[in-house]
Amino acid sequence: MRFISLKKPSDFKKTYQGIKFYTACFSVHFIPAPTPSVDMVQYGITVSKKMAGNAIIRNRMKRHLKESFRQYALCPEIGNYQIVFTSIRKAHEKTWDDYVRAMRKLPELIKKYEQDSYAPQKNTAL
């Protein structure tokens, strides 16, 4: 499994327009990847100064997100998506175990939110 980091602002913007949900440590935006590939996951990580304070804390949060995603997200189950992780307030107070717990739930949450957002909506207008 290859992990490709999103680099272009346009890729981030496209992903931000997709489906969004929250976990205890971060928010997740995702869309189906524009170029289907079985062995590749595209991801991006954002941590703002406003949320985390100084650079040491921000970089630690990025390392935690990246490593927990790489080890515990079970990427073959996730499928072929572009995913952006954005830190939330108080995420710098979370432990490594909190990040791991959130990442282990990621595949089932992505499947759930994808099914909910693409399900046909009932027309309630009379």
Image (cartoon, rainbow, N blue to C red):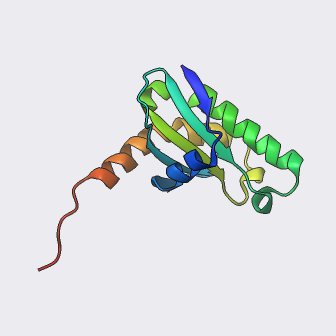
Residue drawn at x 58%, y 29% as measured from the top left? 72
> In the image, residue 85 lies at what x, y percent?
61, 46
Asked if residue 93 is positioned above or below residue 79 in the image, the reply reads: below
Q: Residue at x 56, y 45 (%)?
A: 11
Please provide percent x and percent y for residue 53. 84, 58
In-image side of 30 versus 85 (left or right): left
Nearest to the observer: residue 31 or residue 74:
31
Is 92 placed above or below 111 here? below
Residue 6 place in picture, x, y as percent: 61, 38
- Seen in the picture, residue 80 relative to 28 is either above or below; the reply is above
Q: Position of residue 37 (x, y in %)?
A: 43, 24
Is 2 situated left or right of 96 in this image?
Answer: left
Instruction: Name which residue lies at 66% across and 44% down.
Output: 45
Quick one: 70 or 17, which is closer to the camera? Answer: 17
Question: Can the viewer see residue 22 in this picture?
Answer: no
Task: Residue lying at the far bottom in this picture: please name it.
Answer: 126
Q: Quadrant of the C terminus?
A: bottom left
What number of labels is visible?
Answer: 0
Q: Which of the image's four quarters has the N terminus?
A: top right
